[in-house]
Image: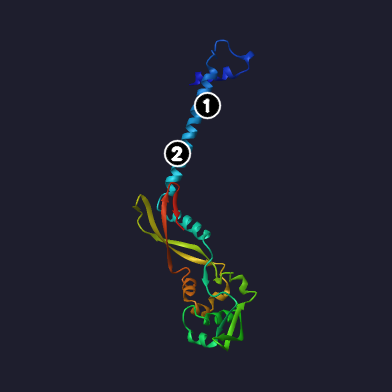
Amino acid sequence: FEDWQRRMAACDAPEYTRLTYHSCDGHERMKLMVKRHILAAGLASVCLAFSACSSGKKEATTENFARVVSAALERSDAQCYRIDDLPVEYPVAKIEALRGVSGGPDGLEALSRAGILVETDTTVKVGSVRVPGKRFEKTDAGKKFIDDKGRLCYGRLALDKIVGWTTPKVTAGVTETIVTYQYRLEEEPEWVRQPAVQKAYPDMGKLITGAGRAPLRMPLVQTEDGWDSEQ
């Protein structure tokens, strides 16, 4: 090996300093072969690294599932609850008749007290007569939370932690699992914590009070690039 190194160094020297007893005819071919071996080894290492990374992403681990669930929640829409097309008017008698019913018009009263809507007395036509009623419309503050479709939006879900998952199984050629996780609510406005609002809209209330405690579930599938969400 030392003799080979001396030959290589001699052939790399300026032509007028080369030693005549060294044969340099195959020197360039030798250098090219060495470079090719080095390049091949490097490419093999890269391929092995990519293969290991791809294989690692397919493992059923807390880290992999946390990454996928977090990305899916970031892509999802804000949490919204359909109320009414605003402005809207209700007879007082109807409000009283539906009081306590989930999603009933008395929920609009709770939103009025929270500063999201403004409530004014009016008269509403019922048949051929006009009766006492209430008119509800968005306040300037409410415009930030109620969209043009009459949906009341109150924050976005984000991953708190992975709780567990089902054993991955193959169904119709696809490897699947269901991941259980706890969530937190981000961009949460203060008014969602008001008991009257949560009582009027219990589904909203459950989601708010369940943050950090109540589990949610998300199905995941295994792809060539690792786990992914269908939502």
- How many tags in the picture? 2
Q: Amino acid at mark 2?
A: Leu
Rendered image: mark on residue 2:
none
Can you say whether 101 is above or below 40 in the image? below
At x 50% / y 23%, what residue is drawn? 33
Q: Amino acid at mark 1?
A: Lys
Residue sitting nearer the eye, 118 or 46: 118
Q: As drawn, is 102 to the left or to the right of 28?
A: left
Q: How busy is the neighbourhood of tag 1: few (under 14 within 10 Å), some, or many (20 plus)?
A: few
Residue sitting nearer the eye, 225 or 138: 138
- Mark 1, residue position: 35
Image location of residue 41, percent across then percent down = 47, 32
Image location of residue 96, percent across then percent down = 50, 87
Q: Is residue 115 visible?
A: no
At x 47% / y 41%, what residue is drawn? 50
Numbered disc 2: secondary structure? helix
Among the 4 quarters of the image, the one containing residue 152 = bottom right
Of callouts 2 and 1, the N-terminal one: 1
- Mark 2, residue position: 48
Q: Is residue 197 visible?
A: yes
Q: Extreme top residue here?
A: 20
Q: As drawn, is 196 to the left or to the right of 118?
A: left
Distance CA(mark 2)–CA(mark 1) = 20 Å
Numbered disc 1: secondary structure? helix
Image location of residue 154, percent across then percent down = 55, 70
Q: Are marks 2 and 1 in contact (CB under 8 Å)?
A: no
At x 50% / y 57%, what residue is drawn? 71
Q: How busy is the neighbourhood of tag 2: few (under 14 within 10 Å), some, or many (20 plus)?
A: few
Can you say whether 126 is above or below 72 in the image? below
